[in-house]
Structures are given as structure tokens and as C-alpha cells.
Amino acid sequence: MSAASPHRSDAATPDGRGRRIGVVAARFNAGVCDRLLAGARRALRAAGTADADVVEVRVPGAVELPLAAQRLLDASGGRCDAVVALGCVIRGETSHYDVVCRMAADGLMRASLDARRPVAFGVLTCDHESQAWARAGDGPDNKGYEAALVALEMLAVADGLSR
């Protein structure tokens, strides 16, 4: 099965066979995050990743995503080749939105760089709830779906750079 986002320049689905993928999803804004998680699962199955090779972890919110991602990738006992991080932050009336978004983004980047393994950023940062729902649909433009494909593609890129 090959499905591409309208924003991707290629139509190839990366090969997920034999890959161990962690999917860390926030519970805050649960309805949207559940749809992102379903999208990620669809993409991983389409890419050939066995359900048994997917480790799913739920955390309270976007700020907690980096620690879970880091633990899944930890060199001393990491169970995953890559992590897909899923969350949804919707702007409110205070600057809390900016703080949460920055903490999640910086923490996930740090987890990826420290582990030298991919952490795909599937955290929605939206101004309105309607924007979040639009990005968590059933098709291949679901941002959870896209993030899962990014994780697999970056594993292939890293493999190529290791040669």
C-alpha cells in the first residue's frame, strides 16, 4: 500500500518490516490524540511493521512525551529503533501554550539527538480545536500517519549514512 501526503514529494511508503517502533501519545486532548494514534498504527501496518513490534505508551500531556521517548530509546535498555511522538496543544488565552510547545519540541529533539535515533514530531500545535480535528482525519494526511512514515524514513536514511 502506498499513500502519500499532498505535502510529500514521493509516493513510496518506507519499509517497516523488522523495525521496533515506539508510539508515545498524550492523553490530554484525548479525542484528537486517539485519532493521531490510530493514524500512526495504520501507517506502520501499511509499511509492514508487525503489531508486536510496536510499543505504545500513553502519557498525561505533551510535556511528558520527551521522557517517555527517551526511555524507549535509552541505549542501556531501549526497546525501540525509533519513536513517534503524538500530542495536541491548542492555544488558549495565556502564554502557557508557547511554553508547552517549546518544552515538547526541545525535549523530543534532545531525546532524538542523545539517542542518535529518530523521534518523529507528531505534536499538533493549533490555534483552534477545529484545526486539530482537521489534522487528525482518517486519511493519509493524518499527522500521526505522517509522523510514523517519517520515523521509518529516517531509519532508512540513518542506515544509509552508517554505510
Image (cartoon, helix red, strand yellow):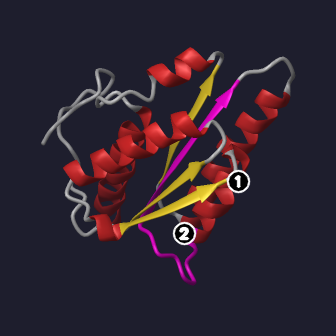
Residue at image mark 2: 72
Q: Residues within 10 Å of mark 1 (few under 14, many from 20)?
A: many
Question: Residue at left 20%, top 34%?
Answer: 3
On-image quarter of the N terminus: top left
Point out the tag, 2 or 1, that comes first from the N-terminus.
1
Report which quarter residue 30 is drawn in: top right
Judge whether residue 33 is colored magenta: no
**From the viewer's perspective, is residue 25 above or below residue 99?**
below
> Tag 1, which secondary structure?
helix
Q: Quadrant of residue 145?
A: top left
Q: Are marks 2 and 1 in contact (CB under 8 Å)?
A: no
Residue 143's place in the image compared with 114, above or below, is above
Q: Which mark is residue 64?
A: 1
- Pick whichever, 59 or 1, lies toward us: 59
| Residue 155 appears left or right of 109 | left
Q: In this rendering, would 50 be left or right of 136?
A: left
Packing grade of label 2 (10 A; few <14, some 14-19, many >=20) is many
- The span picked out in magenta is 72-90
What residue is shown at x 54% (from left), y 17% (from top)?
A: 131
Residue 104 in the image, given as x and y percentages of width and height: 69, 44
